[in-house]
Image (spheres, rainbow, N blue to C red):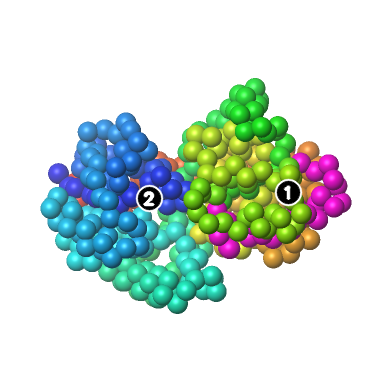
Amino acid sequence: MTTVAIDARKIADFGIGTYVRGLVGALARLDHAVRYLLLAGPDGPAALPHLPGNFRWLEERSPGYSLRELVSVARSLRRERVDLFHAPHYVVPFALPCPFVVTVHDLIHLRFPEHRSRLELAYARTMIGRAVRRAERVIAVSRSTAEELSASFPAAAGKLEVIPNGVDEAFRHPPSDAETRSALAGAGLEPGYLLFVGNPKPHKNLERLLAAYRRLLDRRPAAPPLVLVGEREGVRSPVASWIARAGLEGRVRRLGHQPAGHLPALYRGASMLLQPSLWEGFGMPVAEAMAAGTPVVAGARGALPEVAGDAALLVDPEDTEALCRAISQLLDDPARRAELGDRGRARAGAFHWDDCARRTLEVYRRALGSGYGGTG
């Protein structure tokens, strides 16, 4: 039986963690002919507790972006006689004993070098280049990422497969109004707030969103509160100083990191999602909000127009006034919000984890050729 190993150490994270959970969950539904080995820390199994018998967890404690992982992971794969390794991000161990597939989500580090040290930039460029050069196949989660990857690393061009992310089914069947109100009450929220989902990294453009919200309040003091979801506890964050500088204390709620199970109600209770990113490799919050029927205002950059299609209000993310105006226009126009919600549900129908898994299985098959023993 073919053994495919997947690096699942980031399974509890946003971003790559959402990808790993969605892909592995769908593979578990679709493929019972391949043995899967999931490398993760001791908390990994709690993220997907009910996997079938052809899936096995292997504890791997080496931290991400460390020298240790470059050796330890390869040693585990050699010991387990793995046939194919899937790296869900661009850090691939040295001396792998088998062919591998790599998924590249974005090139944010290289697109915004001013936010990284020289060492971080050198590491990212070296590891991405090495991964795409040596991989059997390279998966990009959007055409935008694929085009950027081909332009920056020509070795990727002949190996690329664009496979969009999926959306968890929980977002397509959000809680009822009564269930939503009950879920929000625990956080002290009433439906109708403005919502931002993401970490405060510079490319998320949160500081400019706060400036746009300040303008909105100056013009309409009764505007709904802004709710921020995604900050990690214990991680140094500039958000408090941004809020203070904009004079927004008491008008912005910081809920921090929320379990995935809480997100459907948070989307359902929002009047709109605000995602004015300067760049995204995909933009999971946009896809999730659309699936939940929540109107979206998003930056017209990177993969966001590709993911949203005509189901979101797209704005120049560097134009604070345009962002403020877009929010105000949607607040004034319930019919437009309803229209965007309907379009979003339809658009999100293009993003299913089972589709992602089927196409990924085909990539595994091509990477291994006649040595592959699974279904797809």
Q: In which quarter of the image is the C terminus?
A: top left
- Reading the image, the residue beneath label 1 is 249
Residue sitting nearer the eye, 307 or 375: 307
Q: Is residue 371 visible?
A: no
Type of secondary structure dominating the magenta stretch: helix
Say what secondary structure mark 2 lies in. Answer: loop
Amino acid type for the residue under numbered disc 2: Lys
Amino acid type for the residue under numbered disc 1: Glu
Magenta stretch, residue numbers: 199-224
Residue sitting nearer the eye, 150 or 53: 53
Q: Is 202 in the magenta?
A: yes
Q: In this view, does 143 lie above or below 257?
A: below
- Reading the image, the residue beneath label 2 is 10
Quarter where residue 54 is shown = top left
Asked if residue 113 lies left or right of residue 361, the reply is right
Q: Is 101 in the magenta?
A: no
Say which residue appears at 17% left-offset and 58% top-offset.
75
Say which residue appears at 55% left-offset and 53% top-offset.
199
Q: In which quarter of the image is the N terminus?
A: top left
